[in-house]
Structure formats: C-alpha cells, structure tokens
Amino acid sequence: MQLTIKYFGMLAEATSITEEQLQTEACSVSDLLKKLKNQYPKLNDKDFKVAINQELVNNNYRIDNEVEVALLPPFAGG
Amino acid sequence: MEKKKPKNVFVQGAISSQFIGESIAKHQTKTSIGAHNIFLGQVRADEIDGKVITAIDYTAYEEMANQKFHEIREATFAKYNLTCMHIYHSLGAVTAGEICLFVFVSSPRRKVVFEALEYVVEAIKADVPVFGKEIFEDQTHQWKQNT
C-alpha cells in the first residue's frame, strides 16, 4: 500500500522535503518511524508527534490502510 | 445535525490593527452582547545568545489546524455562554511588534468572556499544529516552541 508522508517545520528542514509517497506493508507507527529515521538520520534527535489522517496517534497505532501520515514538531501557535 | 465544514482561520502575514478595528465595529449590530474580550498575540523581539529575533515565519498543517480550531470553537461554545467567537492566525512572516494571533469572544455578560478567552488561547497553544521559525537579524534561525 502507498502512504503519503508529510514533514513540517524543523522536520521538513531535517529531511529536506515536505512530502513523499512511500510503499509499505501494514506496520505500526513505530516500525514506520524506524524506517524513516534510518532514511533520515537527522530525525533521530528530533522531538515530534505523529498524526494519521489529521488525528494524533501513539506509536502502537497500526497502519493498514492508505493514509496520510504527518510528522509534527512541537507546536508554536500564537 | 449536519457537520459544519471548518472555517479557514489563517491569514497571510500580520493581522492589522485596521482589521481588528473593523471586526469590533461589525459587532455594533449585535446588541445582545454586553461584553467583548480580545487576545492579541504579538511577536516578541527576544534576544538569544546576543542575537535578536526580527520576525517569525509561520507554517501549519493547515487542514488539521483548521479542524483543531473548529473543535476548539465547538468545545468553547459548549462550555461557555458566548454570542460569538472569532479566531485568526497568521501564516508566513510576521515582524516583531506585529500581531500574529487575534481571538475575539463576545457574550451578554463579562465574567464568561474572561474565562472563555483564556480557555481558547491555551487550547490553541497546546493543540493546533502551527510551527514558527524565529528569524534573527543575521538571517539565521531557530524553531519556536510553546511553553
């Protein structure tokens, strides 16, 4: 299945991209993050949350559908 | 009940005092209102390690942010007896001294607007995916983090 991965703020800076498509088997959020941190080592020292289809999820969340995954650095509104 | 589509809260660049003034004027026809309360977030020229912040460049996960603003709005109306509420947040560069967040709540009575405004602003700071790049005078930057 194909996932859309979005990167924001300092994470877009760390990966040098804002969005990409990724082919993957069903996996947990933590499996996916392992893969992304391997691909973008600069993500390793960053603090962020993960949203699936615009809802925050924890690392145990299982991705078994073609969803939009967003990596969100600390919020700074206002 | 039909689900309302979230409004777009974002405006490009700083929020002008003229825009804020016009927002207030628009409420003169709503005569059940007895109290307004307004929060204005202003970009601070903080000095960090001898360098001064000259602007914040805001970005957001816009779809999710507008959805969160919508949820905050619904929760606030459920909790407080408000006549109306408006939220505007900047995207893009906002210079130190300019306004980047405008929250406006109105009610028949004053006590409720004091509480409601704080509730809305704290929820925005905690729950909405907006990101701020703090630009220094030498064009280097760091990333803002709400505390």
Image: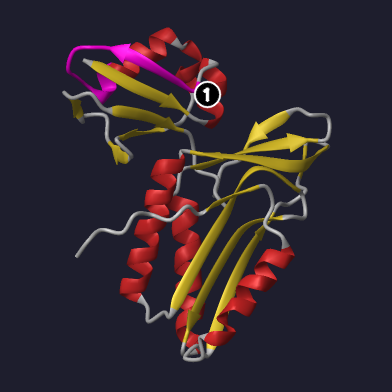
- The part of the image, by quadrant, that contains residue A19 is top left
Residue B100's x, y, as percent? Answer: 64, 54
Q: Amino acid at mark 1?
A: Ala
Q: Is residue B146 above or below residue B21?
A: above
Q: Disc 1 is attached to a residue of which chain?
A: A
Count of number-bearing discs: 1
Q: Is residue B101 above or below residue B93?
A: below
Residue found 26% across the figure and 27% down from its top: A67
Extent of the magenta region = A18-31
Residue B79's x, y, as percent? Answer: 33, 74
Residue found 64% across the figure and 64% down from its top: B40
Residue found 42% across the figure and 26% down from its top: A6
- The part of the image, by quadrant, that contains residue B93 is top right
- Judge left or right: residue A17 versus residue B25: left
Snapshot colouring: secondary structure
Residue B103's x, y, as percent? Answer: 55, 65
- Judge left or right: residue B144 versus residue B81: right
Determine whether the residue tagged by mark 1 lies in a helix, strand or loop: helix
Q: Is residue B18 above or below residue B25?
A: above
- Judge left or right: residue B8 versus residue A60: right
Residue found 31% across the figure and 59% down from its top: B4
Q: Can you identify the residue that label 1 sits on? A: A12
Q: Is residue A53 above or below residue B100?
A: above
Residue B89's x, y, as percent? Answer: 57, 53
**Residue A28 falls inside the magenta stretch:** yes
**Residue B146 falls inside the magenta stretch:** no
